[in-house]
Image: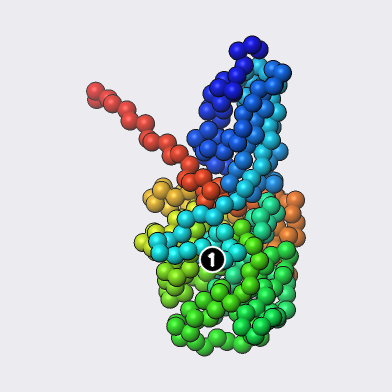
Amino acid sequence: MSSLSDTAVRHALESYVDPVIGRSLVEADVLKAVAVRDGRALIDIELGFPCEGYRKDLELAVASHVGAALGVDVGVRVTWTIGTHAVQAKLQPLPNIKNVIAVASGKGGVGKSTVAVNLALALQAEGAKVGILDADIYGPSQPRMLGTSEKPKSPDGKSMHPIEALGLQAMSIGFLIDEEQPMIWRGPMATQALMQLLNETQWRELDYLVIDLPPGTGDIQLTLSQRIPVSGALVVTTPQDIALIDAKKGLQMFRKVEVPILGLIENMSFFCCPNCGHRSEIFGSGGGERMSAQFGVDLLGRVPLDPRIREQADGGKPTVAAEPDSELAGIYRDIARRAAARLAHGEPERAFPEIQVSDD
């Protein structure tokens, strides 16, 4: 007990690799304070991302790890502070918005909008202030998913208040037009509309603004990457090869404009029969892993093909809000934590392949 010191505690922490951050807490520079009092180790950890659903697990894991290494009682406190992170060159962060996260897919029909709204709700459930911008001018879906047809109010005739829905601040062209009204606009008009929705909305102190992009790599995606300060992007795909082809294009587009890729999300990854529990990989398997390995990008998680996800989104209360304690909500929250951790603390360490030398 007499050999216990701050240095010994820090040394013990060097071997604890956090599964969400993907590196040791020492290397991630999240140790706010380490102290020894009356033979007890006290550890104060400050993460750069919200982790309400993970905080207690981390406290217990760190206390167990250090306690086993040093044979002492350990007290751990985990908090977080969300900062503003780097964006593209020559762009500045938006007023009242710390970070913009783009959710993209190269192809339509992969469930990107459902993933985007559940991720926004998951970040909120983890303790962040979150907004969502529906950037799909031609096919806005967020008003339906958020369960509201409320029209934005303007305090001055020049700007709009965001719509409040399920605790999120939200804006969409769908709040301004009838649901069945088609937007027959050329590209420049659509991109101008996107910029107006973003800049003329009076967002109130957001940690994250999630932008639900339309599928593809066209005018709106290019406008976002060149004129909107994006802290990071998430790419949604399904396991099948035809979806992966287009997802790769979307990923490469962000890389060319120097927007960090926070990770991949494999949606509709598998289906579990609710009656017998049999698991079927309807759209194939391994696509997300192959793309992750090819481009050196993390596969943040797999979302199953589950009727409840569709039903709840169509009903105006997506899964994270409808069933916050469910396994499905837990998947979204885990993905949200990992994405936010990548933004705050960088990519995890990647193990190099072991090289074996043989005389054969």
**For residue 96, what is the image quadrant?**
bottom right
Q: Is 49 placed left or right of 354 in the picture?
A: right
Residue pictured at 63% horizontal, 69% vertical: 203
Please state which of residues 124 and 145 is positioned toward the viewer in this rendering. 124
SS at mark 1 in the image: loop
Q: Residue 220: percent from the left, percent from the top?
A: 46, 74
Q: Residue furthest top?
A: 2
Answer whether residue 122 is visible to the viewer in this image.
no
Q: Residue 37: percent from the left, percent from the top?
A: 69, 21
Q: Give amino acid for label 1.
A: Leu
Residue pictured at 42% horizontal, 69% vertical: 226
Residue 98 in the image: above or below residue 73: below
Which colouring convention does the figure follow?
rainbow
**For residue 357, what is the image quadrant?**
top left
Residue 306 in the image: above or below residue 173: above
Mark 1 sits on what residue?
94
Image quadrant occupied by the C terminus? top left
Q: How many numbered discs?
A: 1
Residue pictured at 67% horizontal, 39% vertical: 78
Residue 171 in the image: above or below residue 284: below
Please state which of residues 204 and 340 is positioned toward the viewer in this rendering. 204
Q: Residue 356: percent from the left, percent from the top?
A: 32, 28
Please state which of residues 149 and 295 is positioned toward the viewer in this rendering. 149
Residue 99 in the image: above or below residue 43: below
Image quadrant occupied by the N terminus? top right
Answer whether residue 196 is visible to the viewer in this image.
yes
Q: Residue 280: percent from the left, percent from the top?
A: 59, 53
Residue pictured at 57% horizontal, 59% vertical: 98
Disc 1 packing (10 Å; few <14; some 14–19; many ≥20): some
**For residue 210, what is the image quadrant?**
bottom right
